[in-house]
Image: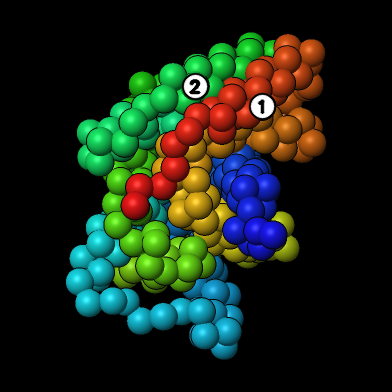
């Protein structure tokens, strides 16, 4: 019998958790900007990565799950971390600051539309018609979900930053397949966070020391930062990396179409938006699209 940790059902569960964490991250990030007026984009990302690193490095070291990088792999991790968390989070978090959380999550949900084409260009991975149908249905579902909601107003600069995040996420996925078969998902994410901290440190030291002193670090702020650092910056990426390893980049990425669904659910729970039947229909179509995409006979490149 297939061990649970290698079963498709377990992989689907982890990918679902990853999009839940990423979905609520838009709402929590927006809440932090509204709560802490001195919190900058770079400082928020740095604190997320610092929390993730402080938690994960001792734990993985004690479990002996943080192997040394193989010879020749450092360049891939430097590039991987340059894509995410550095450039991606700069673009995404700036976008969230400038537009509504719901709109930001919808733009990010278009990533699966471009990843299969990136995989085809980079690795000649076949694009199956069921994959395209699943992506199309999921995007229709996202549109239905937003028709029943709010937050479609934004500005051009915010949309430009979010489009940049989508583009860099495709590049990230292409680089990820270079290392995903050689390291456990938690180790990959932890190395990304460590290198990401190094990338962000000069920016924080140059521009954000004054802002850091103004942050209240209230219980609410700490709770939001801990959730973003542990769940969204560590567990979500680890679960996604696991999905890429066992399903392939194109099929794993399709789950990202559900991110706006969970963003809206979080917004409803926090009282920021109202639930409607149009939103319910959108959720159903998104889920249908994800299920159809999983029927496509593609897998990880070997």
The quadrant of the image that shows the N terminus is bottom right
Determine the image quadrant of residue 33.
top right
Say which residue appears at 36% left-offset and 42% top-offset.
169
Instruction: Identify residue for label 1.
Output: 287
At 39% from the left edge and 62% from the top edge, which residue is drawn?
181
Residue 23 seen in render: yes
Foreground disc of the pair 1, 2? 2
Viewer-proximal residue, 51 or 82? 82
**Residue drawn at x 49%, y 72% as measured from the top left:** 53
Judge left or right: residue 161 versus residue 48: left
Is 42 located above or below residue 182 in the figure? above
User: Residue 295, percent across and down?
Assistant: 56, 29
Task: Give x and y (percent) for residue 133.
Answer: 50, 17
Image: 96 above or below 57: above
Q: Is 52 located above or below residue 1 in the figure? A: below
The image's mark for residue 240 is none
Q: Residues within 10 Å of mark 2 (few under 14, many from 20)?
A: some
The vertical placement of 63 against 101, above or below, is below
Residue carrying label 2: 130
Picture mark count:
2
């Amino acid at each position: 019998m297939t061990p649970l940790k290698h079963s498709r059902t377990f992989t689907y569960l982890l990918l679902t958790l990853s999009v839940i964490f990423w979905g609520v991250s838009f709402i929590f990030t927006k809440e932090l900007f509204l709560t802490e007026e001195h919190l900058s984009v770079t400082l928020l990302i740095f604190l997320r990565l610092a929390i993730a690193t402080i938690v994960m490095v001792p734990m993985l070291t004690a479990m002996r799950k943080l192997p040394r990088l193989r010879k020749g792999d450092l360049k891939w991790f430097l590039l991987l971390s340059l894509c995410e968390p550095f450039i991606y989070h700069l673009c995404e978090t700036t976008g969230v600051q400038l537009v509504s959380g719901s709109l930001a999550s919808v733009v990010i949900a278009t990533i699966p539309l471009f990843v299969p084409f990136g995989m085809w260009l980079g690795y000649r991975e076949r694009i199956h018609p069921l994959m395209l149908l699943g992506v199309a249905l999921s995007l229709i579902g996202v549109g239905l979900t937003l028709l029943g909601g709010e937050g479609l107003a934004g500005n051009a600069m915010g949309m430009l930053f979010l489009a940049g995040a989508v583009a860099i996420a495709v590049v990230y996925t292409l680089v990820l397949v270079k290392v995903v078969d050689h390291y456990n998902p938690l180790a990959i994410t932890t190395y990304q966070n460590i290198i990401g901290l190094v990338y962000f440190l000069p920016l924080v030291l140059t521009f954000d020391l004054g802002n850091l002193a103004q942050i209240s670090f209230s219980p609410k702020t700490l709770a939001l930062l801990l959730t973003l650092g542990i769940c969204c910056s560590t567990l979500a990426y680890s679960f996604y990396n696991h999905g890429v390893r066992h399903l392939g980049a194109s099929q794993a990425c399709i789950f990202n179409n559900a991110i706006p669904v969970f963003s809206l659910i979080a917004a409803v729970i926090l009282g920021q938006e109202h639930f409607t039947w149009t939103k319910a229909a959108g959720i159903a179509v998104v889920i249908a699209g994800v299920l159809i995409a999983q029927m496509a006979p593609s897998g990880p490149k070997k």
